[in-house]
Amino acid sequence: MKPTLLVLAAGLGSRYGGVKQIDSVGEHGETLLDFATYDAKQCGFERVVYIIRKDIEKDFRARLFDRIAKNFNAEYVFQNPDSLFTSEQLAKISPTRKKPWGTIHAVLCAENAVHTPFAVINADDYYGREALRLIHAHLSASEENSTEHAMVGYVLENTMSRSGTVSRGICVVENGYLSSMRENTKIGYQGNTIVSELPEGSVVLTGKEWVSMNLFGFTKKAFEGFHAYWDDFISKNNSEEKAEALLPAAASDIVLQGKGKIKFYSSPEKWFGMTYPEDRAIVKTEIAAKIAAGYYPAELWEKV
């Protein structure tokens, strides 16, 4: 079975100030997702499934999806605010809540569209072809119901932004496998020092820590753990305005509860992404350099 690429593209982009998933960064209007999808195709992924919000569907199709669907097996599903909720749970949701319910909620919204082992990526991050190749090779060798999953990690200092704080899952790795992972939702520079603001206080980081950028590879067996994590999360956060069920926490939960293992890979390629508006110029420069070096063709897709 050839793996599927699952793309988390339903975020609000509150720090960016817009729908960064469909902002152009290429020479011909291509988005970061064009390049990620192109890389996935080059690595042997069979299809791509995008998770989006219903309110961006028209623009998503016009500025990205219709072009990609002419060149690759692609589809999209919606992360609706009421998906996965019972009527009783829906009644408890805060009427002022605007945020989506997080990346685990997004992945579960796409469960029926995933039929093979699958990789997960963010829509606004650039991972590099080698990272996707590592995940593809792992998933291609996986048995359907295997409980061994995978991830590609990056060095924290290479994923920071000088424009503001970032959210990263900080990993503990032992003997090539993930031991634990904690989502740090507010990591930023204080001068030249990297500091994480946690509920229990500030923690100074070295910058050399391994972090998750939401590049995972799972067999479908992982959905069992994701459902259990979601059910526990919503039982505690049903009425919260901003609480999110996050993929790194659920992945770590699979390991901590002995439900599976996560093989840890690292990539030599440079990560970059669009968290803040100022990041877009950096991304455009990086993409232009890769095109100039021949890493990408000037015209990414044959059919436009």
Image (cartoon, rainbow, N blue to C red):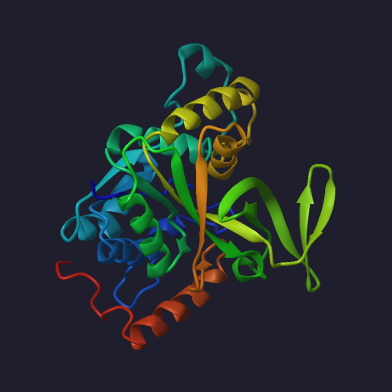
Does 273 sit above or below residue 140? below
Horizontal side of 260 relative to 194 (left or right) equals left
Towards the viewer: 164 or 136 = 136
Q: Residue furthest top?
A: 88
- Tell me which residue sits at (71%, 67%) in the image: 207
Q: Quadrant of residue 25?
A: bottom left
Q: Position of residue 123 (x, y in %)?
A: 43, 56
- Tell me which residue sits at (49%, 68%) in the image: 267
Q: Position of residue 8 (x, y in %)?
A: 43, 48
Towards the viewer: 238 or 91 = 238
Q: Position of residue 181 (x, y in %)?
A: 64, 47
Residue 98 seen from this side: no
Q: Residue furthest front?
A: 175
Towards the viewer: 3 or 11 = 3
Quadrant that contains the C terminus: bottom left
- Tell me which residue sits at (41%, 84%) in the image: 289
